[in-house]
Amino acid sequence: MNGDTLPSPLDLSTEKNIGNCIYNIRGLQVMLDSDVATFFDVEVKRLNEQMKRNIDRFPEDFCFQLNDDEWRLVLRSQNATSNSVSSKRRYNPYVYTEQGIMALSGVIKNEFAIRMSIKIVRVFISMRKFILENGDTLLELAKLQNRQINFEMETNKKFDEVIKLIDKKDLPKQTIFYDGQYFDAYEFICGIIRKAKSNIILIDPYLDNRALTFLKNRNKDVDIFIFSSNAKSKLTAAEISIYESQYGLLNISNLETIHDRFIITDKNECYSLGASLNYAGKRTFGINKIEDNGLIESILNKVGM
């Protein structure tokens, strides 16, 4: 053995962890500032401060800051390998090559950091040797990975285009749902709700908790105004509280002077419902779009909106 000893399990584990934190960016093997700080047992802020105070020791092939595309690529890789990297940083991270890590150990002046820098550089060298010996195989794997990434990006792009077309598609101006068409009625009404950009006004004197299942489909930050009848509605304060704890505030007002049901989105698109939302799919009823702006305005005036 020539006096050499086998590495301990701890050493093997450390080398594996180091290897998982090395990336190939701009044709260089680099490590994130946050990972270097973890191995050096110092704060990221202090690590980068020491680098900036001694900037003449850190040319660009020793240390550089990632651009947005490079940072997204690192985050994508981390998600794929389940490593822990925070995407909530206020600025893009710096990365250090093996030469940069050795330079860091000289400015951090921490005995533990010096020992760790030697371990890290040895892993850099080992990985570079492995890449040189297996370059052809790794190149083929990289080509396969790039094809997969390009396929995923193209698929996601097409999927987004389909979703946009669905969102832009106008709902029918008139339709009838028959007894038993629960899903069709649900999807149609949810389609109306999802189109709202700023507010939804629901007028339904016979409201109960089943109607709230539609309203949870609203877009974020869309305000909901409900006008119902205290005498006829079966919606309880407890049910309202439970809904609001998860989906946000409901602005509910008592209204005893309207019999029909309406949904108005963004104060400019109005549908008249032939039955309460509670009975969507349970009874045959029609939905009609009201396109007369004067009629929509008169309904809004009636409820004080």
Image (tube, helix red, strand yellow):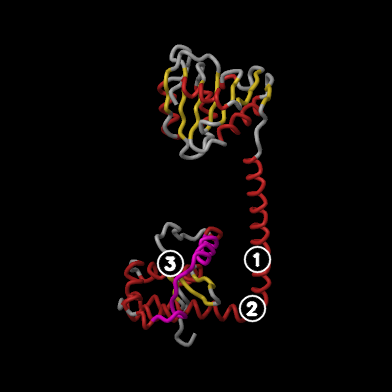
Region in magenta: 58-78
- The residue under label 3 is 93
Q: Residue 301's x, y, as percent?
A: 46, 22
Q: Earlier in the sequence, mark 1 or mark 2?
A: 2
Q: Gap between marks 1 and 2, in whole Å?
A: 16 Å
Q: Residue 67 magenta-drawn?
A: yes
Q: Is residue 111 visible?
A: no
Report the residue at 63% width, 49% height from top. Answer: 160
* Residues at circles 1 and 2 in contact by the CB criterion of under 8 Å: no
Report the residue at 68% width, 72% height from top. Answer: 140
- The residue under label 2 is 135
Q: Earlier in the sequence, mark 3 or mark 1?
A: 3
What amino acid type should be assigned to the residue bearing mark 3? Pro
Residue situated in front as seen by the camera: 18 or 194: 194
Q: Quadrant of residue 87?
A: bottom left
Q: Residue 1's x, y, as percent?
A: 49, 85
- The residue under label 1 is 146
What amino acid type should be assigned to the residue bearing mark 2? Gly
Q: Residue 110's x, y, as percent?
A: 31, 76
Q: Quadrant of residue 113?
A: bottom left
